[in-house]
């Protein structure tokens, strides 16, 4: 039980004020009719007895009440996270409880109130969902519990669930789903297309007996002579290839979309891609840049690689500087010696802005397989396609269409220089990026 004085826990419910108003009205009505005051006084006496009984039940009989908040070890940024309150009380009657959570300031929420009816002497769970949109440490306060009995005249305020802190990491909840789907095929989402192979994998797996449809070029004549049956070499998709995610931390990645910045979308997608690539036995690394060279994690597939990348992504922040692609090129040439798949998360808002960086992108593409991933503004696309009943709407739609067209021109110009591109909406980034990675692996162009 709390040691707080009872008068600091005592609150009057609206039902008590309504009851007092009804008693006063009964006295006034009886006086106006010159009637006997027996019934109003009896009404007042019953109300006082109920009020006293409510006070005794809530405060004086020593019943116990507990409420413990259960937080995940960490929260996933941009995803729905479940928080539970474990509730138990020893009162012999049902309690109506109003749970008021003191949420971290990042949520800017002052109305996180949950009303539940808990049966007598039972344990119960109260669940609610949170969607953080910022990485960092989140400080939870107390859980304020407002208890009231079935009479509902008084409320008892109890402060439960000690303050706690939890870190919000890049989106890790979808990792398992992506791993399972990526084992055999691309994700079944719009845009996930598997293209024909342009090469032939030479990573040997096993020797098997020839069946109709096998490639005759793979016949193993030595094994055929030993077995006296036609045997062929079976190859599998090449593994242990290097994949790097390169994340632009410049000012253009600060742009918000549905609560998350473009940088956070790139971070979440990089974590998903790291999980899929490591699951497929590729070596995965990370590199960041802005106006100066950023963090670098060498490509590897050791057991702790995903955790290392997760911690690096957790600490990442944007800067309000123009990104320096020349320094990016110098860093890549210095630290990445083997031909790798480079997935560059950036954003170009105009063709001239892209052309300023094009020489460095072309030089990167000469030494590595470069995939440039940038973002399509779906709100601008909706404005461009919307009806325009007024002259102002025509101007708005025309300007929006110009920006949408420039994005398409960027894709076309990069493609003419042999640079792979992926233009996608932010909310589809993870699915589209994983699909593109699986497509590249299937085509064996790395």
Image (cartoon, helix red, strand yellow):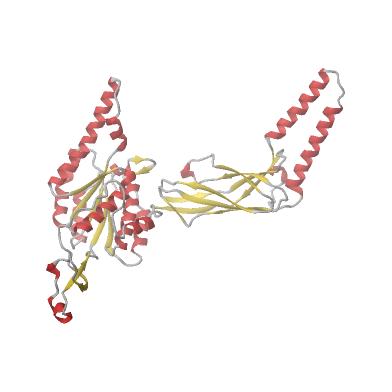
The location of residue 364, given as percent across then percent down, is: 16, 53
Looking at the picture, does residue 32 appear above or below residue 139?
above
Q: How many numbered discs sit on the rendered protein?
A: 0
The location of residue 292, given as percent across then percent down, is: 25, 51
Q: Is residue 211 left or right of residue 187?
A: left
Of 147 and 290, which appears nearest the observer? 147
In the image, farthest residue toward the bottom: 226
Q: Is residue 139 visible?
A: yes
Of the 4 image quadrants, the one containing the C terminus is bottom left
The location of residue 285, given as percent across then percent down, is: 28, 60
Looking at the picture, does residue 116 appear above or below residue 178?
above
Of 298 and 408, which appears nearest the observer? 408
Of 192 and 229, which appears nearest the observer? 229
Q: Quadrant of residue 21?
A: top right
Q: Is residue 93 left or right of residue 421?
A: right
Looking at the picture, does residue 78 appear above or below residue 181?
above
The location of residue 223, given as percent across then percent down, is: 16, 78
Q: Residue at x 21, y 35 (%)?
A: 405
Q: Is residue 111 left or right of residue 338?
A: right
Of 18 and 194, which appears nearest the observer? 194
Looking at the picture, does residue 241 appear above or below residue 128?
below
Q: Is residue 291 left or right of residue 6?
A: left
Q: Residue at x 35, y 59 (%)?
A: 180
Q: Residue at x 47, y 43 (%)?
A: 107
Q: Residue at x 22, y 39 (%)?
A: 407
Q: Is residue 446 visible?
A: no
């Amino acid at each position: 039980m709390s040691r707080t004085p009872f008068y600091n826990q005592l609150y009057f419910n609206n039902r008590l004020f309504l009851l007092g108003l009804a008693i006063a009205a009964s006295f006034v009505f009886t006086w106006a009719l010159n009637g006997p005051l027996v019934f109003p006084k009896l009404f007042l006496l019953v109300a006082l007895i109920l009020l006293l009984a409510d006070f005794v039940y809530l405060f004086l009989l020593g019943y116990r009440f507990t409420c413990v908040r259960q937080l995940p070890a960490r929260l996933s940024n941009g995803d729905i996270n479940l928080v539970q309150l474990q509730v138990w009380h020893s009162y012999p009657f049902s309690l109506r409880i109003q749970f008021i959570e003191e949420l971290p300031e990042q949520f800017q929420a002052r109305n996180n109130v949950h009303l539940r009816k808990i049966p007598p002497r039972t344990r119960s769970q109260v669940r609610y969902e949170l969607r953080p949109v910022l990485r960092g440490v989140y400080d939870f306060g107390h859980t304020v519990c407002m208890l009231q009995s079935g009479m509902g005249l008084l409320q008892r305020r109890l402060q439960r669930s000690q303050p706690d802190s939890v870190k919000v990491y890049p989106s890790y909840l979808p990792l398992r789903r992506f791993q399972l789907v990526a084992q055999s095929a691309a994700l079944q989402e719009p845009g996930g297309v598997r293209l024909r192979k342009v090469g032939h994998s030479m990573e040997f797996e096993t020797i098997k007996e020839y069946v109709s449809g096998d490639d005759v070029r793979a016949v193993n004549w030595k094994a055929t002579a030993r077995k006296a049956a036609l045997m062929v070499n079976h190859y599998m998709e090449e593994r242990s290839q290097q994949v790097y995610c390169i994340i632009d931390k410049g000012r253009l990645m600060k742009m918000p979309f549905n609560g998350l910045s473009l940088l956070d979308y790139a971070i979440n997608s990089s974590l998903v891609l790291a999980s899929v690539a490591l699951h497929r036995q590729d070596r995965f690394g990370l590199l960041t840049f802005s106006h100066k060279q950023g963090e670098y994690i060498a490509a590897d597939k050791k057991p702790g690689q995903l955790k290392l990348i997760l911690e690096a992504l957790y600490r990442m922040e944007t800067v309000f500087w123009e990104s320096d692609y020349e320094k990016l090129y110098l860093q890549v040439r210095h630290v990445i010696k083997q031909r790798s798949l480079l997935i560059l998360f950036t954003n170009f808002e105009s063709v001239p802005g892209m052309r300023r960086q094009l020489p460095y992108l072309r030089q990167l593409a000469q030494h590595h397989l470069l995939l440039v991933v940038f973002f399509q503004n779906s709100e601008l696309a909706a404005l461009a396609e919307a009806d325009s009943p007024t002259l102002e709407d025509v101007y708005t739609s025309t300007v929006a269409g110009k920006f949408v067209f420039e994005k398409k021109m960027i894709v076309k110009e990069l493609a003419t220089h042999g640079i792979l591109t992926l233009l996608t909406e932010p909310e589809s980034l993870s699915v589209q990026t994983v699909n593109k990675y699986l497509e590249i692996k299937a085509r064996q162009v790395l």
